[in-house]
Amino acid sequence: MGVRFVVIAAAVVASAVSAVVAAAGAPAEALRQPDQAHARSGDLRELVHRLSTEEGLDPKLVDSVVRVESGYNPSAVSHKGALGLMQLMPDTARRLDVDDPFDPEQNVRGGIRELDRLIERYSGNLQLALAAYNAGEGAVEQHRGIPPFQETRNYVARVLALYTGESFRLSDGRLISPVRMLRDAEGRTVITNTAGGDGRSLAISRTGGSAGALRGGFGSR
């Protein structure tokens, strides 16, 4: 009786766990195979790197955006209705010809092109491009800079911190120093917060120079 009771109890517990997981919308296999999510994340990071390189935008920048936007969850949906890895709004997805926002390749390629367009529009000013990606171009124009929305200000600071490895502090909706993508004398892509890019650079893109031109507001294409 004791053995039979243990077996029945174990079956009941397993059934209850499966029911809870199913109710949460996650496959029960995720509990039994915890390494799957990690492997999936690795595949998605490789996808981000490949598509960024193909589209001519710095993979590290795109990786930073994806990490903040969705945490590499291709099924992410925000409370505002933004979808997928790079959190595309439905109207934006349609404009970018993204038929399925939950398809990682379509979503990331569309998001890269949108981010690239914004970087070009704001002449390499990354904080304005990121603010527009998060809050919309209208908000950036209305406030003549980073909008005074806590969500947007935190978003810009977090992405730039991941991208450059530096901490950023916002003051009155603006970064203390503008962060721009420039070319240095050797043709490398430099991320700098000094006027003209002559001072200490914050980061240097691994895909600049001989690896090919990167679009990012510095007139490379």
Image (cartoon, grey):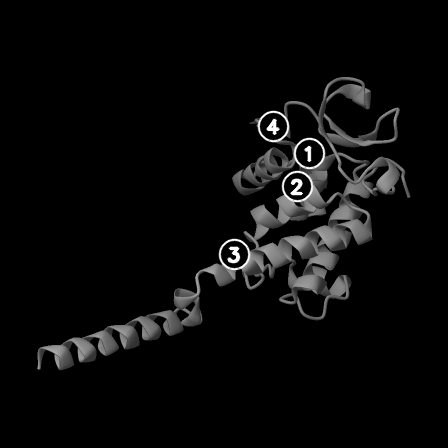
Q: In the figure, is residue 197 to the left or right of 140?
A: right
Nearer the camera: disc 4 or disc 1: 4
**Which residue carries the number 4 mark?**
166
Q: Secondary structure at mark 3?
A: helix
Q: CA distance from mark 4 to mark 1?
A: 21 Å
The type of residue carrying mark 3 is His
Q: In the figure, is residue 141 to the left or right of 67?
A: right
Q: CA distance from mark 1 to mark 3?
A: 38 Å
**Percent position (x, y) of residue 91?**
69, 63
Report the disc number at residue 38: 3
**Which residue carries the number 2 mark?**
131
Q: CA distance from mark 2 to mark 1?
A: 8 Å
Q: Secondary structure at mark 2?
A: helix
Question: Is tag 2's residue or tag 4's residue first in the polypeptide sequence?
Answer: 2
**Percent position (x, y) of residue 182?**
82, 30
Question: Is tag 2's residue or tag 1's residue first in the polypeptide sequence?
Answer: 2
Q: Secondary structure at mark 1?
A: loop
Nearer the camera: disc 1 or disc 3: 3
The image quarter containing residue 178 is top right
